[in-house]
Amino acid sequence: MNRTNRILVLNNIAPAGLDIFEGQMELGAGVSNPTAIIVRSAKVETNSYPDLVAVARAGAGVNNISVEQATESGVCVYNTPGANANAVAELVFTMLGVHFRKVPQALDFMKSVIGDDEKISSRVEFQKSQFSGFELAGKTLGVIGLGKIGVLVANAGVQKGMKVIGYDPFPTFANMHQLDPRVEVVRQMEEVLPAADVLSVHVPFSAKTKHLIGAAQLALVNPDCVLMNYARDGIYDDAVVLEALKAGKAEAFITDFPTQALLGQDRVICTPHLGASTAESEENCAVMAAKQLKNYLEYGVVQNSVNFPTVEAFPAQTVRVRLTVVNKDVPNMIAEIASTIAAAGINIHKLVNESNGKIGYNLVDLEVDIDDATVDQIRRLPNVLKVRVLRFEK
């Protein structure tokens, strides 16, 4: 077991993910002073752990993790985009069906029906018309955010015979490549709002997306529009949504993020944050998070980080030592790191550097060992945040 890496497990992480570390690293809920954390929904204040180098979130959102603190300390934070996408997309259409077919009202009615089979049949036939609903086919689905979940929702809408209009301010080639060509992609969110019979938003939560759907946006939707939030709490301005519903400016609000203000309101359906709550999704997220964390701890490889640039270079077989150097993204850092190593008489086999405008991340591969004094010199360089030494057995 590699005792150098100590992984604190918060929440119930699917065993298939934890098995990836089995027998290789110290792992568990009782680990003290961890070098890494794997987590679902628990709060993580990264500055509380002095030896921490990475946090892996088994899920997409990272609002439970102090990402800014982590960045300032050179701690890498990961998430697992797309691992729960199918679960969320399926629930969107489940809940649309629940609303359009008046399922809650029908179930409540059935609880009140008593008598023998003949009386039950008679009452059902007499009153079923009050639960007559609508079909999704022919409706217009507006999708804001064409990431992995948004693309699945948009494509499923097409398959159900809906007209689908999508918008994403920063579309990626990989996601757009998966989008059904029958989805109409527009340049402005305001083009989606008035056209949509159903508005489903799938964007991450940030300062820029807080209340993305607020008063100005709801003023544009048609009064028959069903609003859906299976992304993150805070994407909609819930207070404004309630005002719109009461004023007849929207048809319904279906959300995975219940609040005291929303519960019990007419034309509001709340689910208890079920978006990613499937056995398959939890296992997918756990496995993806564990693999990414293991690659970072063992090789310094960065995949799906929310605060570090992506660096997926694995070391060659001749490499004996890999240094991972995290620094503020300022000029001349590569030269300072390289010159410090050269002054120790060590030749650099390969150096990979990537930056994201805030963090610079370097993988420095050496074919000989490096002494602690030289590593300490690199750690003391201005603007260096964290240095790790990864040694490989030959």
Image (spheres, rainbow, N blue to C red):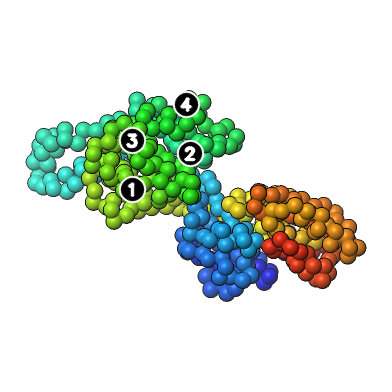
Q: Name the residue under label 4.
A: 184
Residue at 60% x, 73% y is: 33
Q: Mark 1 points at which residue?
A: 238
Q: In this view, does 22 lie above or below 193?
A: below
Residue situated in front as seen by the camera: 32 or 265: 265
Look at discs 4 and 3 and give the one toward the viewer: 3
Residue at 48% x, 64% y is: 43
Residue at 24% x, 33% y is: 133
Residue 376 located left or right of residue 171: right
Look at discs 1 and 3 and give the one toward the viewer: 3
> Which x, y percent locates residue 242?
28, 45
Could you say which quadrant of the image residue 123 lies in? Answer: top left
Q: Mark 3 points at which residue?
A: 219
Evaluate if marks 1 and 3 touch, with contact meaning CB atoms under 8 Å apart.
Answer: no
Mark 4 surroundings: few (<14), some (14-19) or many (≥20) residues within 10 A: some
Residue situated in front as seen by the camera: 12 or 296: 296
Residue 42 located left or right of residue 223: right
Q: Name the residue under label 2.
A: 145
- Disc with the residue nearer the chain's start (1 vs 4): 4
Q: What secondary structure is marked by label 1?
A: helix
